[in-house]
Amino acid sequence: MSISSTTIPAQGQRPNHAALQRWVEESARLCQPSTIVWCDGSAEEAARLQQRAVADGVLIPLNQQALPGCFLHRSHPNDTARTERCTFICTPTKELAGPTNNWMAPDDAYALLRREFSGAMRGRAMYVVPFLMGPPGSVLAKVGVELTDSIYVVLNMRLMTGMGGIALDQLGRDGAFTRCLHSVGTYDPDHRYICHFPQDNAIWSFGSGYGGNALLGKKCLALRIGSYLGQHEGWLAEHMLLMGVKDPTGAITYLTGAFPSACGKTNLAMLTPPAAALAKGWNTETLGDDIAWMAPDAQGALRAMNPEHGYFGVVPGTSLTTNPTAMAIMSHDTIYTNVALLPDGTVWWEGKDEPPPAQCLDWQGQPWAPACGHKAAHPNSRFTAPLTHNPHLSPKARDPCGVPVSAILFGGWRSATVPLILEAFDWAHGVYLGATMASETTAAATGQTGVVRRDPMAMLPFCGYHMGDYFRHWLAMGARLKSPPRIFLVNWFRNDARGQFLWPGFGDNMRILQWITDRCHGRVGAIETPLGWMPRVEDVNLSGLDRGRERLEQAQAIDRDAWKREIAAQREFFAQFGDRMPQELIAQSERVLQRL
């Protein structure tokens, strides 16, 4: 029997899309919600949902004079980060998912999930959230529909995606869409599953309300499903920032950058140049801070766009010193997650401009003082806000044609071995640099922090198919490009013998972006080294930096023995991909060893 408004009350206007209506009805029969709410994405709807969320204790209103339109959310204590052990790629064979993904057979996954979802929404509303990833009208834009029982998810999806009518307009009466089913369940980590079905264009997530597990347009669709679609459709879905660098001539050079979570990606995407650089005409603009979709255009150039409509940024360490743009973005109409609450109704986190408060409520709502022995804000606390809050948002940010990419950056958090900056010799060498990048783990993924792990292109947790095939796809993409972007490896985090950073980072990273931009336009030379092209010291703007030349030389030093150990670790990593590992990348490592 088909569900109708006479069996389960329904609110909102249902679209004229038969397949979508059937799927919502089937899901409602499974989940048994008390009501079905079709979301339209309007401001009036958001106000109603915010009031309901406050009444239910999901959101806490903040000081509306100091932080207008802002709210605080506290997660379940066991649900504060992506849970990779609970994340599965469900393909017909395990080989298709590859050795770096958790795999579950689709039939087994659907059977397990149907048991979990059966009756999971009793007493709750099922919100139907149509959402658009990408600018309206783009050939790469994708429509998803998330069914969820979390009002927090709905409000975040409104900030992160094109929600409601804008998505349904793109979908039309018979367009394809990603089916996204979500329930927080009981937050039991033993009953937590984030399952992706690439062949079915479907995502089922159960037992978590955290962003990366529950905002299914983000990592789930934009990367895991997106990367699979990109492989089959001839484009790239990447865990990358997208920004523009404006030089003194007024020309803008667009670049992307892959960095694992909490390794400075958002800070770089929103970089504010030093005053001296601004005075000379250098500046930056933001297009996206986390995800880039890229495809060759008719002229053989690589063009990129940001599929997201908002930010889900890491808060700790963010301040007017480190990222004034982010501070401006989150000053109004923002959802804060797992930060500390001050007595005046404002928020605080470690690394904010103000010193630690004498007292506050920590991220779990418990009294906190500096002597407590634990952090007031969760290390992975977040802010959610729309792109339009960014005072330095690029005019091209919502261009359906995207922007031409001149440079691709790869970089992780490495305290030793990896230089501050080098340029690949060619596309294949650049793919090798991306395929072998590693980073010390962060709080964005559950597990031990500070451990160096291999994270190719910052996509290890997000690639929706076999990583060996992913490398092949990257190599093949280069062959389709008449003017491929230059590829660079950066490492802002190299330490000296005392464990201090050799490079000041943050706004001073503009000095490296200047060299990268000049390289893209052939305005500056470089030195050939065993690892790649490196800048001459005199070609990097070091004006005003204490011991700038000495520190740059240390940050660029090549420890040949350390690199031989590094290459051995790379080969060990490559070995797990067996016959699907491209021989070209293995040959690249051999060439580096020979040059060393």
Image: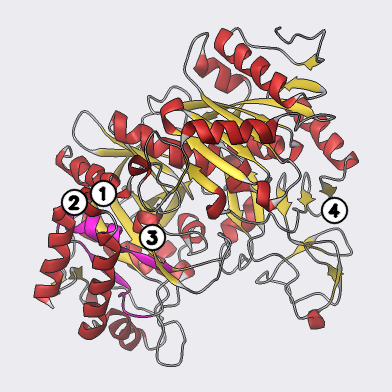
Q: Which residue is mark 1?
A: 471
Closer-to-camera residue (265/572): 572
On screen, residue 514 above or below 295:
below
Q: Which residue is mark 4?
A: 63
Q: Earlier in the sequence, mark 3 or mark 1?
A: 3
Query: Residue 151 has which mark?
Result: none
Instruction: Please say whether residue 453 is one of the residues in the magenta stretch.
Output: no
Q: Which residue is mark 2?
A: 582
The quadrant holding residue 368 is: bottom right
Q: Is residue 93 left or right of residue 148?
A: left
Q: Give the position of the N terminus as an image quadrant.
A: top right
Which kind of residue does numbered mark 2 sit on? Pro
State the separation of the CA atoms marked 1 and 2.
7 Å
Q: Earlier in the sequence, mark 4 or mark 1?
A: 4
Residue 298 appearing in the image: yes
The quadrant holding residue 502 is: bottom left
Query: Residue 455 has which mark?
Result: 3
